[in-house]
């Protein structure tokens, strides 16, 4: 769980009483614009206007991605109900009520909880949304996530809805930090062709899905794009064989890659370039999808990723030394003692992943 930055803010306030403090934030930093204010009025993907007079004290997450996002931003203390299925196996359900039977939402159980807010990822059936609203519940239905930018927006929206904007901002910053390392690692690297195998029926992820962006961000070319697939569609195995991908990637909830025997003739299969990626990361439009990107890069571009990570650690260490010594990277107005105090505060509250 990420830690709030209250201790850091307190330390900086103490320092500011001795010297002026100047801070700088880039306008395009994803986490810098997440703001919480109530009463809150927002419009969801169904066109419904959602009004919250005050911050919700009880929240139900209908889908695994909703629950994952709540945990990631540090709002799980308000979570009274969540799915109970393999897709939430990495989350601590505790004494929270299970609001699903497998992957089916149990509307009556949600209504019985009488939460202040219900979060519903786009895969939630419209009939379920209507049923919960008819029972008087406030339901926010998210739009379909077609990109990593959409995932970021979902994180920010969840933060605003649950009054956890600091946690949402911190989560988005972590996502971008990890993606920055990936971007650096892939500079000048070749992009091998990859086939993403989702199901026995040949279903794959096309160009208008967030999984497509996961693949391309991780430094591979998606076979589905060559085949002209835009959504979640079936890909003819003959097309896969003709394209002859270098890698086969699939979600690890299966013991073996879901491919027909003919695909075993591809370079990827013959060279054992078959990668099982954590299904709960790559399949959910939630913060940990970034970890799926890293997982792919570490496997397909291991040397480049290791070097980029090492370079970043070296740069960060140099920046910290410069700040502590009052060099050009130091916060204006901070002398050595003040900088040390600030750095100690940062060390105390820094999130660890």
Image (cartoon, grey):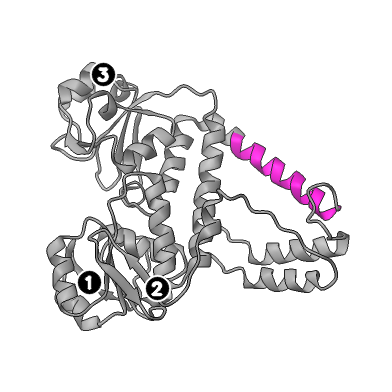
**Mark number, residue 99:** 1
Residue ID for mark 3 = 243
State which quadrant residue 228 falls in.
Answer: top left
Label 1 crowd (10 A; few <14 / some 14-19 / many >=20): many
Q: Position of residue 69 (x, y in %)?
A: 39, 61
Q: Position of residue 224 (x, y in %)?
A: 26, 29
Q: Position of residue 285 (x, y in %)?
A: 34, 52
Q: Is residue 1 visible?
A: no
- The answer to which of 99 and 8 lies nearer the viewer is 8
Element type at marker 1? loop
Question: As drawn, which residue projects farthest toward the top?
Answer: 242
The Cα atoms of the two marked residues, 2 and 1, are separated by 26 Å
Q: Tell me if residue 338 is in the magenta stretch.
A: no
Residue at 35% over, 42% down: 277
Which of labels 2 and 1 is toward the front?
Answer: 2
Above or below 118: residue 145: above
Element type at marker 3? helix
Q: For the magenta stretch, what is the residue range?
A: 308-325
Q: Position of residue 136 (x, y in %)?
A: 20, 80
Residue at 28% over, 57% down: 87
- The answer to which of 46 and 179 lies nearer the viewer is 46
- Which is more N-terminal, label 3 or label 2? 2
Above or below 22: residue 112: below
Which of labels 2 and 3 is toward the front?
Answer: 2
Q: Tell me if residue 310 is in the magenta stretch.
A: yes
**Mark number, residue 40:** 2
**Mark number, residue 22:** none
Q: Is residue 137 visible?
A: yes
């Amino acid at each position: 769980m990420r830690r709030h930055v209250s201790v850091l803010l307190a330390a900086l306030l103490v320092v500011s009483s001795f010297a002026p403090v100047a801070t700088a934030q880039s306008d395009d930093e994803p986490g810098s614009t997440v703001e919480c204010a109530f009463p809150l009025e927002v419009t969801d993907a169904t066109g419904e206007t959602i009004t919250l007079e005050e911050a919700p004290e009880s929240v139900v997450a209908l889908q695994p991605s909703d629950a994952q996002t709540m945990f990631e931003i540090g709002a799980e203390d308000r979570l009274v109900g969540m799915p109970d299925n393999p897709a939430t196996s990495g989350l601590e359900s505790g004494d929270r009520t299970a609001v699903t039977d497998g992957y089916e939402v149990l509307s009556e159980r949600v209504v019985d909880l009488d939460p202040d807010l219900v979060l519903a990822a786009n895969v939630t059936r419209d009939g379920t949304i209507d049923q919960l609203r008819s029972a008087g519940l406030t339901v926010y239905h998210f739009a379909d996530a077609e990109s990593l930018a959409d995932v970021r927006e979902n994180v920010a929206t969840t933060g605003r809805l649950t009054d956890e904007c600091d946690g949402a901002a911190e989560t988005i910053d972590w996502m971008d930090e990890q993606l920055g390392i990936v971007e650096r690692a892939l500079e000048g690297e070749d992009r091998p062709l990859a086939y993403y195998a989702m199901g026995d029926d040949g279903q794959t992820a096309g160009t208008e899905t967030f999984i497509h962006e996961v693949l391309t961000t991780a430094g591979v070319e998606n076979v589905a794009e060559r085949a002209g697939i835009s959504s979640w569609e079936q890909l003819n195995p003959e097309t896969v064989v003709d394209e002859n991908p270098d890698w086969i990637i699939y979600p690890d909830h299966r013991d073996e890659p879901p491919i027909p025997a003919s695909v075993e003739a591809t370079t990827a299969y013959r060279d054992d370039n078959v990668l099982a990626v954590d299904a709960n990361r790559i399949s959910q439009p939630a913060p940990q999808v970034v970890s799926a990107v890293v997982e792919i890069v570490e496997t397909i571009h291991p040397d480049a990723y290791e070097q980029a990570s090492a370079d970043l650690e070296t740069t960060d260490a140099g920046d910290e030394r410069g700040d502590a010594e009052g060099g050009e990277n130091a916060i204006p107005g901070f002398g050595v003692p003040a900088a040390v105090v600030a750095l100690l505060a940062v060390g105390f509250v820094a999130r660890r992943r």
